[in-house]
Amino acid sequence: MITIRNLVESELRKVPFLSEYISDGIINISSLARRMEPKISSYVGRKINTNAIIMTLKRMEIEEIQKTRSLKKQLKKLGDITVRSGLIVYNFSNSEKFEKIKSKFNLSILSNSKGFHALSKGVNETTIIISENLRIVFEKNIKEISFNTKKENLASITIELPKENTQTIGLYYSILGAIAQRGLNLVEVISTTNELTVVLHQHQVAEALKTLMNQKK
């Protein structure tokens, strides 16, 4: 059975960050309820009292505030933040030829060099991130295959996550959402169990770093 709450939640999901704005007290709940009422009434097939929608929104607001309190405790536990600049991102298709070349190209060549590198393999493609000073040795060793895209003048921010991060609902969402709310575009996102790395354009690093530091307060 579809309830008013189900319909309200469905409407909230259509607008990015609307739930957060409600819990922060930015949105006028009465006005929002009046705006939702025609769609919800149309779906149900009868007139829905606006007060019922208001009460639903207020209950959800209280629940959201409780979740936020727990989440904020974990955000305060965020560890070291490491920034790297001068990065290049290459994207390759996972073809048989690429796998063959990659196996010949020992990543220890990069590991033994002064610089940063990271590899993220998906189902259909692989992304390799290197620092600018590794460009020559890297491109020399993979010259037999072509990359799909190459993006330069990038930087990364690596965040050390609390050990409880895998049991904390909304931690990734809160971190990435805060960056998105600032209008900053993420080029790549890489994660391990206790680390989250975001790659973005170099000129956006200062704003992203400021945003992340505010999350820890």
Image (cartoon, grey):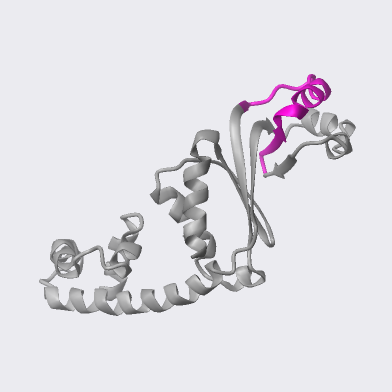
Specify whether 103 is left or right of 130: right
Residue that appears at 72% across and 34% down? 130
Specify whether 210 is left or right of 195: left
Q: State the image coordinates of residue 137 (x, y, percent, origin top left).
A: 82, 24
Q: State the image coordinates of residue 96 (x, y, percent, origin top left).
A: 79, 31
Q: Does the magenta portion include 181? A: no
Question: Is residue 87 among what the camera can see?
Answer: yes
Magenta residues, start to end: 123-150
The quarter in which the N terminus is drawn is bottom left
Q: State the image coordinates of residue 160 (x, y, percent, origin top left).
A: 65, 59
Q: Does the magenta portion include 147? A: yes
Quarter of image, res 67: bottom left
User: In terms of depth relative to the viewer, which is nearer, 9 or 44?
Assistant: 9
Residue that appears at 32% across and 56% down? 14
Q: Is residue 99 above or below residue 79?
A: above
Q: Is residue 76 above or below residue 106?
A: below
Q: State the image coordinates of residue 142 (x, y, percent, origin top left).
A: 79, 24
Question: Is residue 1 among what the camera can see?
Answer: no
Q: Is residue 90 above or below residue 180?
A: above
